[in-house]
Image (cartoon, rainbow, N blue to C red):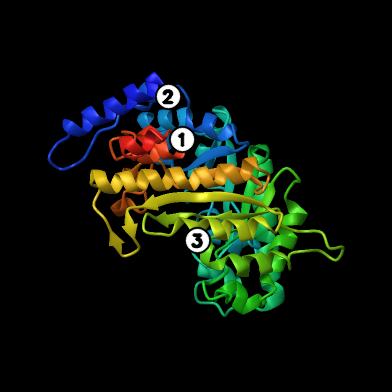
C-alpha cells in the first residue's frame, strides 16, 4: 500500500474513534481527499455527469456553486414536464395545443447556457404530470375525450412545439438527449394504462418516436425512460425493436435507466438488467440516480453503518458500469443524479444522495468517484 493510502486510512480510523455516540462520522471535505470533481471522474470513462435542478438550486449560491463545481449536465426536475409547458388558455384561443416555456424553465436554460452546461430534456409523453384537458374537446376540463385522429394531431403539436420553443429561444443546441416517452411499461411485461394509450391505441408509443424523430435535430438523442428497469429489461428490449421506420431504421437512440435504487436491492440483478439492455446496441444512460437507505416502504436511519453500506453500493454500481463501458460492452455517454443533497431530494426520508443536508460529502460521493478508502469500506478491505 502507498504511504498516502496508509495516511488516509489512519485519518478515517481517527475520525471513527472521535465520532459522536450517534455513530455518525463526518468525512473530510472533498478538496482534502482529491483534486478531481465528479465531472473529471466520469469524463475519464467518456461520460457527462449531471444533476436535476430547480430554480431554487440555481438561485441559492451554495447550491449553484456545488453544481458548477461537480457537474456538466442538467435536467430540470419539473419545469419541462407537460404540466409546466402547456398553455390551456392559448390552446383554447387558437384551437390547437400550444407549448410555451415557463419562466422557471427559461431561467434555468439561461443559467445553463451562461455556465457551459449541456441539457437533458425531461419529458414529453407521460401518463403522469400531464393535464387531463389536453385529451378533451375544446381543451376543457369538462369536455368529452377526443378521438384517435385528433389526439395524434395534439401529440404532434406537443412534440414539434417543444423543439420549436427551444429553437426560437436559442437553447436547442444545449440539448444532447431528450426523454420522449416516460414509464410506459409495467413490471409484469404489460403496457401501462394511460389516456395516450386509451385514445390512440398501443401504437401511441411508435407515433411519439416518429414525431420526435421528425422534429428533433440529429444532435439530440431520443430516449425511452423508465424505472425498476432491472425488472422490465426484457420487455423494454423487445419494445425498442418495434421503434423502426419502414426502412428498418431506429426512431430511438437510447434507453434511460432511472436507477432509483435502494441499498437492499441486489446489485447483481441490476447489472444483469443493464447487460440485457446493452445488447440492443442502443445508448444507455442512468437518468435519475439515487440510492436510498434500506428498501421501499422500509427506510433506514442515516447511521454511520447504513451510510457505509450506501457508499459501498455506489462504489460497486459505478465500478460495474465503468468496467463495462471501458470494455466496449456498454454505450453509456452520461449519468444523471436526481439531485445532489439529501435535503433537496424527493426521497429525503431515505437519505439517497451524495451530500447530506448540510452539503457535507458522504461515503456515497466517494463511492461514485471510485475512491475506495473513503467509500465506506473498513480499513482492512481498502488495504487489499
Q: Where is residue 350 in the image (x, y as percent from the top left)?
A: 31, 53
Determine whether, in the image, residue 284 is placed left or right of residue 23.
right
Q: Is mark 3 on a helix, strand or loop?
A: helix
Q: Where is residue 219 in the image (x, y as percent from the top left)?
A: 73, 42
Answer above or below: position of 250 versus 333.
Answer: below
* Residue 98 appears anywhere in the view: no
Residue found at the far right of this picture: 247
Tell which of 25 and 131 is nearer to you: 25
Q: Looking at the image, is mark 3 or mark 2 earlier in the sequence?
A: 2
Q: Are marks 3 and 2 in contact (CB under 8 Å)?
A: no
Q: What element carries label 1?
A: loop
Answer above or below: position of 198 versus 68.
Answer: below
Quarter of the image that includes the N terminus: top left
Crowdedness near tag 3: few (<14), some (14–19) or many (≥20) residues, C-alpha within 10 Å? few
Q: Are marks 1 and 2 in contact (CB under 8 Å)?
A: yes
Q: Position of residue 338 (x, y in %)?
A: 45, 47
* Residue 45 appears anywhere in the view: yes
**Which residue in the protein does label 1 denote?**
369
Distance in Å between CA atoms under marks 1 and 3: 22 Å
Distance in Å between CA atoms under marks 1 and 2: 10 Å
Answer above or below: position of 325 versus 113.
Answer: below
Disc assigned to residue 72: none
Distance in Å between CA atoms under marks 3 and 2: 32 Å
**Which residue in the protein does label 2 denote?**
34
Q: Looking at the image, is mark 1 or mark 2 earlier in the sequence?
A: 2
Q: Residue at x 65, y 55 (%)?
A: 278
Q: Where is residue 191 in the image (x, y as percent from the top left)?
A: 58, 75
**Which residue in the protein does label 3 denote?**
269
Determine whether, in the image, residue 358 is placed left or right of residue 232.
left
Amino acid at each position: 500500500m502507498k504511504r498516502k493510502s496508509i495516511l488516509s486510512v489512519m485519518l478515517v480510523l481517527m475520525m471513527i474513534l472521535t465520532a459522536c455516540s450517534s455513530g455518525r462520522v463526518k468525512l473530510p471535505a472533498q478538496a482534502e481527499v482529491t483534486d478531481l470533481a465528479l465531472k473529471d471522474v466520469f469524463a475519464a470513462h467518456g461520460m457527462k455527469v449531471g444533476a436535476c435542478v430547480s430554480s431554487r438550486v440555481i438561485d441559492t449560491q451554495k447550491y449553484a456553486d456545488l453544481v458548477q463545481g461537480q457537474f456538466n449536465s442538467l435536467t430540470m426536475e419539473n419545469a419541462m414536464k407537460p404540466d409546466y409547458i402547456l398553455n390551456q388558455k392559448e390552446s383554447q384561443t387558437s384551437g390547437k395545443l400550444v407549448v410555451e416555456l415557463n419562466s422557471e424553465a427559461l431561467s434555468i436554460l439561461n443559467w445553463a447556457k451562461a455556465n457551459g452546461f449541456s441539457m437533458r430534456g425531461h419529458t414529453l409523453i407521460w401518463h403522469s404530470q400531464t393535464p387531463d384537458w389536453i385529451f378533451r374537446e375544446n381543451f376543457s376540463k369538462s369536455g368529452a375525450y377526443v378521438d384517435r385522429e385528433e389526439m395524434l394531431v395534439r401529440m404532434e403539436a406537443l412534440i414539434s412545439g417543444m423543439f420549436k420553443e427551444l429553437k426560437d429561444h436559442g437553447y436547442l443546441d444545449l440539448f444532447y438527449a431528450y426523454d420522449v416517452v416516460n414509464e410506459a411499461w409495467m413490471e409484469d411485461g404489460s403496457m401501462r394504462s394511460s389516456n395516450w394509450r386509451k385514445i390512440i391505441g398501443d401504437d401511441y408509443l411508435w407515433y411519439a418516436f416518429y414525431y420526435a424523430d421528425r422534429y428533433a435535430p440529429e444532435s439530440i438523442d431520443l430516449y425511452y425512460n423508465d424505472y425498476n428497469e432491472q425488472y422490465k429489461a426484457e420487455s423494454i428490449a423487445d419494445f425498442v425493436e418495434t421503434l423502426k421506420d419502414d426502412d428498418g431504421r431506429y426512431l430511438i437512440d437510447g434507453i434511460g435507466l432511472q436507477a432509483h435504487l435502494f441499498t437492499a436491492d441486489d446489485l447483481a440483478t441490476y447489472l444483469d438488467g443493464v447487460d440485457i439492455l446493452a445488447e440492443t446496441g442502443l445508448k444507455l444512460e442512468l437518468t435519475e440516480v439515487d440510492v436510498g437507505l434500506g428498501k421501499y416502504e422500509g427506510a433506514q436511519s442515516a447511521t454511520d453503518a447504513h451510510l457505509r453500506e450506501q457508499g459501498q453500493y455506489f462504489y460497486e454500481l459505478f465500478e460495474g458500469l465503468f468496467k463495462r463501458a471501458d470494455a466496449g460492452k456498454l454505450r453509456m455517454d452520461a449519468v444523471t443524479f436526481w439531485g445532489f443533497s439529501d435535503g433537496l431530494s424527493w426521497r429525503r426520508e431515505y437519505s439517497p444522495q451524495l451530500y447530506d443536508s448540510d452539503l457535507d460529502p458522504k461515503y456515497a460521493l466517494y463511492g461514485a468517484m471510485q475512491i475506495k478508502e473513503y467509500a465506506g469500506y473498513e480499513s482492512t478491505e481498502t488495504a487489499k
